[in-house]
């Protein structure tokens, strides 16, 4: 699998934001068949950071109801990636905006 197939999307929640601020850990939804080694290489290649540790878990899908019909959301795999102290990932493009403002100002 190529890195863009392994990393599906970042998981941005209140809990994952606290992990980013306090422990320099980032959460991603990843492909269900991806293992820790593939996830580590994909994050290092796509974001250009150094990974210390990868923890994975399978998140169970919720049961949803629409009227009288019940269904289930799909199961998905979540990875929590720990980075070196000096590294960070910018999901929102804030660092690029600050660099542009510094050039203009």
Image (cartoon, grey):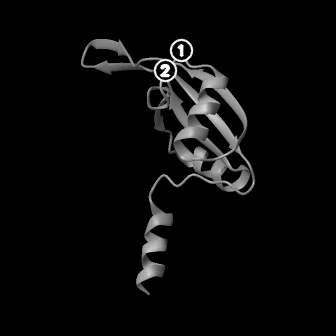
Q: Foreground: 21 or 66?
A: 21
Say which of 19 and 53 sits in front: 53
Residue under pointer 2: 1
Q: Are marks 1 and 2 in contact (CB under 8 Å)?
A: yes
Q: Position of residue 36 (x, y in %)?
A: 66, 24
74 relative position to 88: left or right: left
Q: Residue at x 24, y 19 (%)?
A: 67
- On the image, the x and y values in percent for residue 23 come to 73, 50
Residue nearest the viewer, comparing 53 with 41: 41
Cα distance between the residues tagged 1 and 2: 10 Å
Most extreme residue toward the left is: 67
Residue 67 vertical position relative to residue 82 in the rendered view, above or below: above
Residue 83 versus residue 19: which sits nearer the camera?
Answer: 83
Crowdedness of circle 2 by 10 Å Cα count: few (<14), some, many (20+)? few
Q: Which residue is mark 1?
A: 33
Residue at (64% x, 51% y) in the render:
20
């Amino acid at each position: 699998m190529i890195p863009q197939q392994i990393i599906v999307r970042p998981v941005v929640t209140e809990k994952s934001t606290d992990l980013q601020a306090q422990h320099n850990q980032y959460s991603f939804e990843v492909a269900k068949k991806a293992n820790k080694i593939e996830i580590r290489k994909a994050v290092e290649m796509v974001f250009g950071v150094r990974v210390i540790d990868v923890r994975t878990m399978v998140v169970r899908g919720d049961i949803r109801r629409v009227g009288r019909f019940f269904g289930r959301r799909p199961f998905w795999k979540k990875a929590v990636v720990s980075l070196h102290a000096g590294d960070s990932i910018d999901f929102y493009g804030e660092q690029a905006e600050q660099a542009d403002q510094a050039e203009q100002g």
